[in-house]
Amino acid sequence: MDKMKKVGLLGATALIGAGLAALSEDRIKECVKEKIEQGAMSKEEGKILVEDLVSETKKQRLNLEKNIIEKLHGTIQMADKELENLSDKIDEMKIQELESELEKMKSMRKAKN
């Protein structure tokens, strides 16, 4: 697989993870704000809860990104290996075809003589 495509794929994965984290952080803040407005917790408790949840969300996002990148990397390596094997097989087939053609030409030459 082309190196630029690999980098693009990994970069897209990181951006998706960052986008999900941003959405999660906004949602966490929104939920905590509602709880503060309802009187279920103080602003200080809300602030601490938001920090804890955002921190945990970021850790989970990083772990998810790491796992996705590792799996993508493994898949890319397998695809590269398969491509290399196919290329080798094609080369072998071409060699066999050329050898066959050469034998036919030799046979034709002997038949003429």
Image: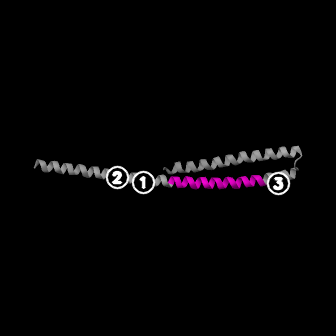
- Residue sitting at 85 percent across and 46 percent down? 35
**Residue type for callout 1:** Glu
Dot 2 alpha-carbon crowd within 10 angstroms: few under 14, some 14 to 19, many 20 or more: few
**Residue lying at 60% horizontally and 47% vertically, measured from the top left:** 12
The amino acid sitting under disc 2 is Asp
Element marked by disc 3: helix
Q: Position of residue 93 (x, y in %)?
A: 32, 51
- Extreme left residue here? 113
Residue identifier under label 3: 48
The residue indicated by pointer 2 is 91
Mark earlier in primary sequence (3, 2)? 3
Q: How many neighbours does mark 3 have within 10 angstroms: few (below 14), some (14-19), or many (20 or more)?
A: few
Which residue is the site of mark 1? 84
Please, which residue is most extreme toward the front here?
Answer: 40
Q: Which residues are magenta?
A: 52-76
Quick check: 76 left or right of 94?
Answer: right
Residue 88, percent from left and from top: 38, 54
Regarding mark 1 in the picture, which secondary structure is present there?
Answer: helix
Residue 64 magenta: yes
